[in-house]
Image (cartoon, rainbow, N blue to C red):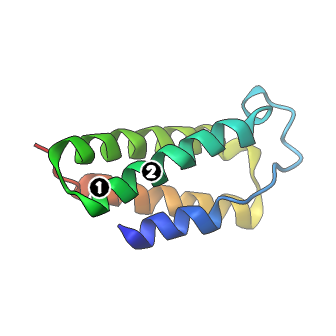
């Protein structure tokens, strides 16, 4: 999980491509910052205390970040697009392996 959190923190910096005319691309950074902050906050809390409530909060943050990331795929091209697709796949695996009761 620490690898995933670090990956998100380091790989989130990206710029919109020439497709940034679309409505989803207008507020990419504001929405993205909120999604990343929630994911990092809940991920750190869950890493420190693996209680069910922290697990559920982390799971929700993962789901929200994945949904946000998928919504901006059309804003990216080339390497940025490829990196985000890889990140989404890794986060989906993390979500699948997360077992909250």
Q: Quadrant of the C terminus?
A: top left
What is the x, y in percent for residue 18? 89, 47
Which is more toward the observer, 88 or 3? Answer: 3
Q: Quadrant of the N terminus?
A: bottom left
Q: Are marks 2 and 1 in contact (CB under 8 Å)?
A: no
Q: How would you rate the neighbour count of disc 2 (Cα within 10 Å): few for under 14, some for 14-19, many for 20 or more? A: some
Q: Pointer 1: what residue?
A: 46
Q: Is residue 15 left or right of residue 11?
A: right
Residue 90 found in image quarter: bottom left
Please identify the residue farthest to the top as the structure is shown.
23
Element at badge 2?
Answer: helix
What is the x, y in percent for residue 48? 28, 62
Q: Which mark is residue 41?
A: 2
Q: Is residue 27 left or right of residue 72?
A: right
Q: How would you rate the neighbour count of disc 1 (Cα within 10 Å): few for under 14, some for 14-19, many for 20 or more? A: many
What is the x, y in percent for residue 27? 76, 33
Q: Which mark is residue 63?
A: none
Which is more toward the observer, 61 or 66? Answer: 61
Q: Is residue 9 above or below residue 25?
A: below
Q: Is residue 8 left or right of residue 22?
A: left
Q: How many numbered callouts?
A: 2
Q: Is residue 101 left or right of residue 49?
A: left
Closer to the chain start, of discs 2 and 1, is 2
Residue 31 found in image quarter: top right
């Amino acid at each position: 999980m620490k690898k995933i959190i670090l990956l998100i923190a380091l790989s989130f910096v990206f710029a919109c491509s020439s497709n940034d005319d679309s409505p989803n691309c207008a507020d990419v950074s504001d929405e993205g910052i909120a999604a990343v902050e929630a994911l990092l906050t809940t991920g750190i809390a869950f890493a420190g205390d693996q209680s069910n409530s922290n697990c559920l909060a982390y799971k929700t943050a993962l789901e929200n970040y994945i949904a946000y990331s998928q919504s901006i795929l059309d804003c990216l091209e080339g390497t940025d697009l490829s990196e985000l697709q890889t990140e989404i796949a890794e986060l989906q695996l993390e979500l699948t392996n997360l077992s909250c009761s």
